[in-house]
Image (tube, rainbow, N blue to C red):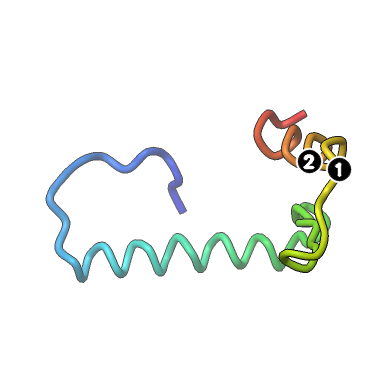
Amino acid sequence: MDFRLHQPRFETWEETRIRLVAETSAFLTEALRHPELAVRIPMAPAGSARFPPSLTRAFWEPVLFGE
């Protein structure tokens, strides 16, 4: 699967759907093949808990900056 930036061109809805399904399938296949690379997303019940700023930074820095 080629994940380079998609070249702008006219694409029918059917072509777009086929491409998106293929890209999603490739992504999920790799994610299932290498679960150790998954990004764990911390959770807290909405409205009853908040994350400390240190956890927010610890989560987002590697995601956004690849550190």
Most extreme residue toward the front is: 47
Instruction: Say which quarter of the image contains residue 42.
Output: bottom right
Residue closer to the observer: 54 or 63: 54
Q: Secondary structure at mark 2?
A: helix
Q: Quadrant of residue 64?
A: top right
The amino acid marked with disc number 1 is Pro
**Residue sitting at 46 percent across and 54 percent down?**
1
**From the viewer's perspective, is residue 3 above or below residue 11?**
above
Q: Which image quadrant is residue 31 in?
A: bottom right
Foreground disc of the pair 1, 2: 1
Quarter holding the C terminus is: top right
Asked whether, in this view, residue 31 is left or right of residue 10, the answer is: right
Q: Viewer-proximal residue, 51 or 63?
A: 51
For residue 55, above or below residue 50: above
Residue that numbered label 2 is attached to: 56
Q: Position of residue 29 (x, y in %)?
A: 61, 67
Count up the numbered dots: 2
Q: Secondary structure at mark 1?
A: loop
Question: Residue 41, position in %: x, y?
Answer: 76, 56
Distance of mark 1 from mark 2, alpha carbons?
7 Å
Q: Rate crowding at label 1 as few (under 14), some (14 to 19) or many (20 or more) other CA atoms within 10 Å.
A: few
Q: Residue at x 73, y 64 (%)?
A: 47
Q: Which mark is residue 64?
A: none
- The amino acid marked with disc number 2 is Thr
Residue 60 image point, x, y percent: 72, 38
For label 2, count other residues whose C-alpha is less than 10 Å away and answer few (under 14), some (14-19) or many (20+).
few
Mark drawn on residue 52: 1
Q: Image check: 54 left or right of 19?
A: right
| Labels 1 & 2 near each other (Cβ < 8 A) | yes
Q: Residue at x 49, y 64 (%)?
A: 24
Q: Residue at x 86, y 43 (%)?
A: 52
